[in-house]
Amino acid sequence: MFNWVFALFHFSLYLGLVAYSVYSLIEGRWGTGLILLAFLTAYYFLVLHQGVLKEIKRKKKKPFVRKQQLR
């Protein structure tokens, strides 16, 4: 359960930073918004992308089984 809480917390922080960078761009602070978006994009591709692809591949291999079918 801790893994879900950890992942959800960090995902919400990531989305918050994306929202703040878009808000900065809208408010006219181009430097701040573009630097944040650049670092968030780099973080995604360097750290998260491989894990996301592995999880998608794992989910495709595992067939969906309803709880009623297990009985």
Image: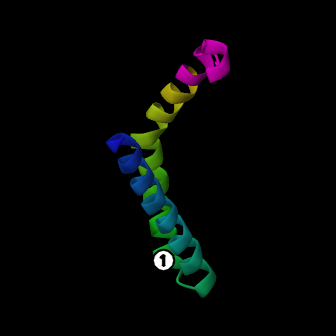
Q: How is the image coloured?
A: rainbow
* Mark count: 1
**Residue 29 is inside the magenta segment:** no
Residue pictured at 40% horizontal, 54% vertical: 10
Q: How far from the left and from the top, in percent, is residue 14?
A: 46, 59
**Residue 64 is inside the magenta segment:** yes
Residue pictured at 49% horizontal, 53% vertical: 41
Query: Which residue is disc 1 drawn over?
Result: 31
Question: Which picture quadrant has residue 64?
Answer: top right
Number of residues whose C-alpha sits closer than 10 Å to that of mark 1, classed few (under 14), some (14–19) or many (20 or more): few
Q: Residue furthest bottom?
A: 27
Left or right for 42, reference 70: left
User: Which residue is at the front of the view, 32 or 57?
Assistant: 57
Q: How far from the left and from the top, in percent, is residue 35?
A: 45, 68
Q: Which residues are magenta?
A: 58-71
Kind of residue indicated by mark 1: Gly
Q: How far from the left and from the top, in percent, is residue 22?
A: 58, 72
For label 1, the SS is helix
Q: Residue furthest left?
A: 2
The N terminus lies in quadrant: top left
